[in-house]
Image: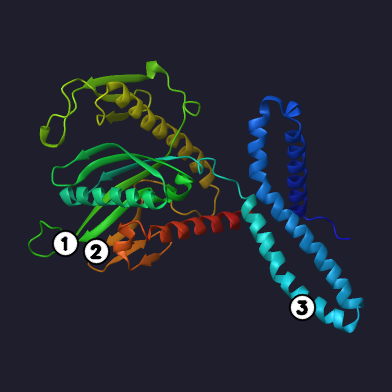
Amino acid sequence: MSAATPFDVKLEKVVRRHAELRDALADPARAGGDFAKLSKEYSDLTPLAEAIDALTKARIEQTELDTLARDGEADMRALAETEMKLLEKRIPALEHEIKLLLLPKDEADARNAILEVRAGTGGEEAALFAAELFRMYQRYAALHNWRFEVMEVSETGIGGFKEAIASITGHDVFHRLKFESGVHRVQRVPQTEGSGRIHTSAATVAVLPEAEEVDIKIDDKDLRIDVFRSSGPGGQSVNTTDSAVRITHLPTGLVVQQQDEKSQHKNKAKAMKVLRARLYERERQAKEASRAASRKSQVGSGDRSERIRTYNFPQGRVSDHRINLTLYKIDKVMSGEALDEFIEALLAEDQAARLAEAE
């Protein structure tokens, strides 16, 4: 009998832990105050335990068929050999599935997200593109039945956005959108261009995992809170009271401003939500940077200064530079319909890179 491989030893530990959790949850008194925590761990481990069980059964079946193929009657040997060929494909597939399930989870994946879109280089054309990107994500959220709440929009007056912030709530929001952070470049003839020349401009997208108060502790003494009168584009009055709020986090210099609500209290709550997300993302990026230093490869750096995608309107194409994927369906990308083609490819590339590093 061959010695257990490190992979098999790891699987045995998972099965043992899953059984321990099942027994503990069967007796709530034994689980005590950790019931919710243990229940989540059990739920997270269950798909892996089920895949391991399927692999164990397939391996047992393979051993039995091998014996039958050697020692059985002629007709049984033929049947066993046919079944063996099917198992020779199924067992590696199960092992691959288990390896994927064993990959460390990004604990931020299940979180909701704060989306920030800002106009970059390119003046008014960049602001118009920023507004189109913001609406693209809004449509994408609707397609996934996510809640998309606009938190702050700074308009330019002719339909462009200098900056727009939204809260996106739903299933696996950050998991699906996390690779959208970076510089999005657009190439097209602006409406204001008379000579028909193609211009290049850009907008920056940041997707931040939403943080709870328990994730980030913010001391009141570290905040400077200014209130002022809200104003719309072109100086149009939005409110006649000092309801707009600007919060400065003194240790980091981060500044968040909210003025969409008529209530100062609501604006402050929204600003704190964005501030917590930005501080949480700073911590998360610092940890990721230290891990990435030892990684052989990764899909993008998550750096907002990295150019990740180009939208070429004259050619009708969108190209993602991290995975060298080009789609000639710019209208469907901008409507949110084809965005999943990029997102699925990015997630698959990241998964493959992490799997290669784990082996």
Depicted 223 relative to depicted 295: above or below = above
- Quarter occupied by residue 247: top left
Residue on which disc 1 sits: 189
> Mark 1 near mark 3, Cβ–Cβ under 8 Å?
no
Q: Which quadrant, please, contains the C terminus?
A: bottom right
Based on the displayed image, in which of its 4 quarters is residue 3 positioned? bottom right
Q: Where is residue 131 in the image (x, y as percent from the top left)?
A: 24, 48
Q: Do the residues labelled 2 and 1 touch (CB within 8 Å)?
A: yes
Q: How is the image coloured?
A: rainbow
Residue at screen point 27% across, 49% down: 203
Q: Is mark 2 on a helix, strand or loop?
A: loop
Location of residue 248 in the rendering, given as x and y in whole percent from the top left corner = 31, 24
Mark 2 or mark 1: name the one nearer the start of the chain.
1
Q: Name the residue under label 3.
A: 82
Q: Of residues 90 and 275, which is closer to you in this image? A: 90
Of the image marks 1 and 3, the number of the one nearer the N terminus: 3
Sooner in the amino-acid sequence: mark 2 or mark 3:
3
Toward the viewer: 337 or 281? 337
Mark 1 packing: few (<14 Cα in 10 Å), some, or many (20+)? some
Q: Disc 2 residue type?
A: Phe
Q: Residue at x 32, y 66 (%)?
A: 329
Name the residue nearer the viewer: 218 or 159.
Answer: 159
Q: How far apart are marks 2 and 1 (CA)?
A: 8 Å
**Amino acid on which the number 1 mark rests in the picture:** Val
Left or right position of 227 against 303? left
Label 3 SS: helix
